[in-house]
Image: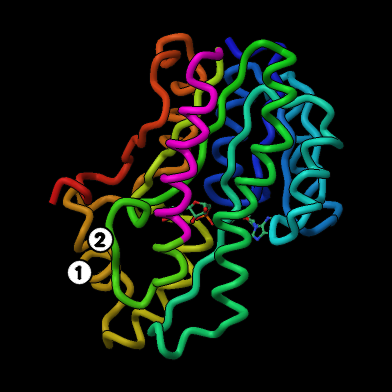
């Protein structure tokens, strides 16, 4: 059980982050949800999780595109036993047409935020004598696709950062790993479907099977619950010697 542990999950008011937060709470951890908005429904989401799983659940606003806010999130939480770096955005364009501000935002949110939060959290983990860093990378942290240069670069960067943090904490009861999901049906992916339908002149089901899941041999989306379960496993005693590595949850994508 993760009772007594505090988990901070960046970018967790939807999608994978929310799914991971729910599974950590189910396993007994107190959770801190985060995104860059500060709406009533963000705080309500935390309250619901707290009530459903009988844990302390808070929502803290912080913009993961800004280094100082990443660090402030950890400081404001006051304790961090489990850090899940999940916040991420996507943009699809050819390299020579890639908007500069999109490149900068993807590198900041998908990669640099993990540096800032980890730097702020490690001293807390050392003080507590236990820690887990779980970075939500991607199959695109291990392989590439055209038109996703910033995302692929950021996710490969996350995998490299994961290995370095693991080496720096190797002799301590702290681990750092990356989870590499294939396609998961979340708002981020849902938003890509209409564009793909237009580009390929296909209906929704055909786009999902023939375009989105062409590289996912299982032909099924991974679920946010499965990613939550993988995170809970990485926080378990069974995973204490797993560090500096990646776990693919991609229906066979990277085996191809
Ligand atoms: P999503 O859009 O549902 O969730 C992204 C989360 O990040 C949201 O909670 C959003 O509010 C938050 N976020 C965005 N910008 C932020 C900012 N500046 N500051 C703080 N929070 C911010 O997408 P998702 O699919 O759940 O993606 C979560 C992570 O999983 C991302 O890192 C993504 O790259 C990765 N991933 C997703 C898939 C997939 O198929 N969905 C596959 C591989 C990896």
Q: Which residue is mark 2?
A: 213
Residue 210, labelled with which disc? 1
- Dominant SS in magenta: helix
Nearer to the camera, 178 or 165: 165
Residue at figure coordinates x 82%, y 50% from the top left: 61
Q: Nearer the viewer, residue 64 or 168?
A: 168
Q: Quadrant of residue 147?
A: bottom left
Image: 205 above or below 67? below
Above or below for 202 versus 26: below
Q: Residue at x 80, y 52 (%)?
A: 69
- Image position, residue 185 (x, y; %): 42, 55
At x 20%, y 45%, the residue is 252
The CB of the residue at mark 1 lies under 8 Å from ligand 1: no
Rate crowding at label 1 as few (under 14), some (14 to 19) or many (20 or more) other CA atoms within 10 Å: few
x%, y% of residue 104?
A: 60, 72
Distance from the alpha carbon under mark 2 to that under mark 1: 6 Å
Residue 172 horizontal side relative to residue 81, left or right: left
Q: Which residues are magenta?
A: 154-172
The N terminus lies in quadrant: top right
Residue 96 higher or lower than 33, as above or below: below
Q: Are marks 2 and 1 in contact (CB under 8 Å)?
A: yes
The spot of residue 32 in percent (x, y) is: 74, 35
When asked about the image quadrant of residue 169, the answer is top right
Place residue 33 in its image quadrant.
Answer: top right
């Amino acid at each position: 059980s993760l009772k007594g542990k505090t988990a901070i999950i960046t970018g967790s008011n939807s999608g994978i982050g929310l799914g991971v937060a729910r599974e950590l709470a189910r396993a007994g951890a107190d959770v801190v949800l985060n995104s860059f908005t500060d709406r009533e429904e963000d705080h309500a989401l935390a309250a619901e999780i707290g009530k459903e799983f009988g844990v302390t659940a808070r929502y803290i606003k912080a913009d993961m595109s800004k280094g100082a806010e990443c660090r402030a999130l950890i400081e404001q939480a006051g304790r961090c036993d489990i850090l899940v770096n999940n916040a991420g955005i996507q943009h699809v364009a050819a390299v020579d047409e890639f908007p500069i501000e999109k490149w900068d935002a993807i590198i900041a949110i998908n990669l640099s935020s993990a540096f800032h939060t980890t730097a702020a959290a490690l001293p807390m983990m050392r003080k507590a004598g236990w820690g887990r860093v779980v970075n939500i990378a991607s199959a695109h942290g291990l392989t590439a696709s055209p038109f996703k240069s910033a995302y692929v670069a950021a996710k490969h960067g996350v995998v490299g950062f994961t290995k370095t943090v693991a080496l720096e904490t190797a002799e301590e009861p702290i681990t750092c790993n990356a989870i590499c999901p294939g396609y998961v049906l979340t708002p981020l992916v849902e938003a890509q479907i209409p564009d793909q339908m237009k580009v390929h002149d296909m209906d929704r089901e055909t786009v999902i099977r023939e375009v989105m899941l062409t590289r996912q041999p299982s032909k099924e989306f991974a679920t946010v619950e499965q990613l939550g379960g993988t995170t809970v496993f990485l926080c378990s005693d069974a995973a204490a010697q797993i560090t500096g590595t990646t776990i693919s949850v991609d229906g066979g994508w990277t085996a191809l």
